[in-house]
Amino acid sequence: MNDPCDGYGPRAPLGNVSEGTAISRIFQQIRAEGQIARIDIARDLMISPATVTAITSDLIARGLIEEAAAISTETLRGRPRVKLQLRANAHVVAGLKLGANVTTLVLLDFQGRQLAKAAISQPLQNAGADEILALIERVLDSALTKADLSRSDISAIGVGLPGFVNAAEGMVHWSPVLDSRMIPLGARLQDALNCPVVIDNDANLLALAELWFGVGREQRDFIVVTIEQGLGMGIVIANRLYRGTRGRGVEFGHMKIQPDGALCRCGQRGCLEAYLADYALLREAEMALPADTSQHHDRLENLFAEAKAGNLVARSIFHRAGRLFGIGLANIVNIFDPALIILSGEQLQYDYLYDIEVSEMMEANSIDLSDRPVELRVHKWNDQLWAKGAAAFALDHITGAILDTAPQARTRGRQDAIRTP
């Protein structure tokens, strides 16, 4: 279990220290630091101590923050420096990842500490909304039992799944795990579970996990690229996810690299994913190698083992995929000029995706500015931590509702946005 002193959420400062309302800046400072004294909040945010005292007193009265049990031995003008922290049991959220083979869920308290986890191995492809709901209920109840909690204790649920998702509307335009398009999955789950539900593309939520719990906490701008059954990307700009105008952008895997090329599972042709994803590699293997009747994951393992053993056909399949991946990364570099690209996902167990040839291909096809190259960092998160990104989305939803309904906030009207235990 995480130490509450670690905090969670972005630490990297924004360019404008006065951005946002006073209550939002103070709340986010406490969340990021884990534990911090009032006088330090005032100094760091350049807010008067009297304002900090008034706002934190209100947050304490509302049961959202508390004074830490431990009191610092440091003193200021003879008074002990009591630190503040989020109140752990103020809210509990669930976050889950709907994967092609495994559905994973975690429960987090308001301090970001993991209370329980659960996973169910069940292939998902062309599933109906009712099947998705039944699966979510099973894995949710399993985790709640482990944590000795009930559904009524949950303030919000975050769900991540592959495909084109409009997070603001809770609409799934297309997903390989669903049997139809244009499904208002967020609303359907919310009605069935009687709890606020937020959904998003799973790569976006992995980027949020990096921003709130991972290496991205110290980076205000970065990009996450994921390779699993498909190819995804999440973009963080100024400590916020970028989703595009219609809320379903950032589809790196569906960048077109070959007109009228290989068929992608999205229904179009020539997508980058159609040459890199596991189904694309196996499609080529079926034409080039002896028949393999093993399971999907085992066939990919066998193909990689063949390449490592010197099979020239198998090597050529991975070689071309790696080169195309490097070109795709170069396009990201040329468009966004990021300081950091984080590579993540199940397929990163195969080193062809991050070997020297991939980085050389990226650099060779990037605009040469005679400057420090973009940092590529491999972070092999498992499904549990993808689910933690979905839980971060649920926590973000709660935070937005809290700050919008606070007496000092500029806007009102979201009192029904969260469930208060």
Image (cartoon, rainbow, N blue to C red):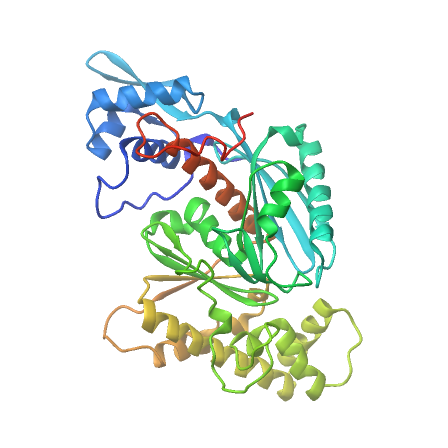
Vertical placement of residue 417 versus 16, above or below:
above
One can see residue 380 in this view: no
Quadrant showing the C terminus: top right
Q: Residue at x 65, y 74 (%)?
A: 279
Quadrant showing the N terminus: top right
| Residue in the foreground of this view, choosing between 340 and 258 | 258
Vertical placement of residue 290 versus 213, above or below:
below
- Could you tell me how many numbered marks the image carries? 0
Q: What residue occupies the far front of the structure in this picture? A: 413
Vertical placement of residue 390 versus 413, above or below:
below
Percent from the top left, x then y, of residue 387?
A: 57, 48
Percent from the top left, x then y, of residue 180?
A: 66, 63
Percent from the top left, x then y, of residue 129?
A: 69, 53
One can see residue 248 in this view: yes
Vertical placement of residue 331 versus 28, above or below:
below
| Residue in the foreground of this view, choosing between 86 and 410 | 410
Q: Residue at x 73, y 59 (%)?
A: 123
Percent from the top left, x then y, of residue 232?
A: 51, 64
